[in-house]
Amino acid sequence: MKSYSEITPYISKMAQLSVDGNGIKPDMYVEHKVNRGLRDLNGNGVVTGLTEVSHIKAKDTLPDGTVIPCDGQLFYRGINVRDLVAGFQKDDRLGFEETVYLLLFSKLPTKTELDEFSAVLSEYRSLPTSFVRDMILKAPGKDMMNIISRSVLALYAYDENPDDTSVPNVLRQCLQLIAMFPLLSIYSYHSYQHYHLGKSLFIHHPKPGLSTAETLLNILRENGEYTDLEAKILDLALILHAEHGGGNNSTFTTHVVTSSGTDTYSAVSAALGSLKGPRHGGANIKVVRMFDDMQQSINTKNEGEIKDYLMRLLNRDAFDRLGLIYGMGHAVYSLSDPRSDILKQCAKELAVEKGREEEFALYETVARIAPEIIAEKRKMYKGVSANVDFYSGLIYRMLELPCELFTPLFATARIAGWSAHRIEEIQNSGKIIRPAYINVKNEGVYHSLNDR
């Protein structure tokens, strides 16, 4: 039997035929007034829907109508995420569960409501009998996101009412998935470690009463131990990744798939497939690997060598030779990404605890220099600043979280936003999202059956 991954001469020949037959050129998007990637020529997103879940602000309009960039702001249900985080930090408490409540129910909970909500999540934080053995350990994979997606689809079979798209039933399904995602992520990683890397296998059952961040650290580590600062910073990272304006690829995927009337498990699996992509959820992995390459290639205490390395990145002459400085720039934010600003301070605190101040200083230097180099090289129409991926990868590494879990952690947070948007789409849409495409095939090249 041939290997599934084998590319035969026939496949190579037909693939080239497909490439040769593609006549769509970049300038045709301008000619036909098509906003490629749902972005206009100025980088602004094309409006495709309405939402109350969250909002991004990156520009101010002056009295004369002039639009200028401003420091980025992110709002969850109308609450500035900076204020939300400041409240948690002032009270010295974890806040992800409260953030999930806010996104789902449009208001902050009282203490009684939060306790009840957290108890429900804790009760749901388990997987069906033998699920770990049958769905995760018996079919281990090399990519955690694929294992999680497969597991989410499998959970359909364990649901006695999977296709009911009423709001109460979908909310129940979403709460269960929010609670299960830490287990799916960590258990998938343990199976990968054991079956592909030959490491010892251990499976910790979740402890009742722990938060999402505490559960992740507890079941990931063999001794189950973590510090208060580690839990608080991971909790903060989850809060900042929980939702982002509705216009990101995976959330749009959630809206599109939900609009077809399909079940929750299919919608979430589709969103996972989107988030897996390196242009979306996998960017922070690229950041830490870029820094690894930088530290191996140059003297990172020499600012001149750092500048030269960054220029070589843009010139496709360093790291992966794709011409990108990972972690810099955002489709919407220009002057600053509020999530990056918050994570930067947390990274600094964690670097002190972990004795990694020198590494943090390198990140600070790159964050300062890179925007100037990008602006000079690219002639950018808007400012460039560090985005959320820039510091999140560093934080995860200092927390001793493996790179394989970076994107699953993103998913563990973003399932909250996906859930809020799925419920919103069910309540307010009623129409399937069906975009239009322009056929640009020259009529003169259509072949008649008689030509054969």
Image (cartoon, rainbow, N blue to C red):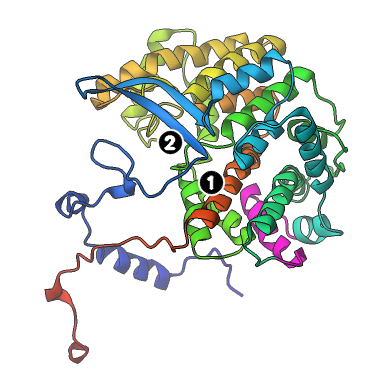
Q: Which residue shows up at 43% across the image and 36% down it?
A: 320
SS for callout 2? loop
Please report contact status of discs 1 and 2: CB closer than 8 Å, yes or no.
Answer: no
Front position in the image: 113 or 228: 113
Amino acid carrying label 1: it is Leu
In the shown orientation, is residue 333 left or right of residue 214? left
Give the overall secondary structure of the magenta segment.
helix
Q: Is residue 224 above or below residue 28?
A: above
Q: Which residue shows up at 38% across the image and 9% down it?
A: 304
In the shown orientation, is residue 153 left or right of residue 375? right
What's drawn in magenta, residue-wise?
Answer: 139-161
Residue 203: image location, x then y, percent: 85, 44
Determine if residue 1 is in view.
yes
Front position in the image: 451 or 2: 451
Q: What residue is pinned by disc 1?
A: 275
Local crowd size for mark 2, using a 10 Å CA cut-off: few (<14), some (14–19), many (≥20)? few
Q: What residue is pinned by disc 2?
A: 320
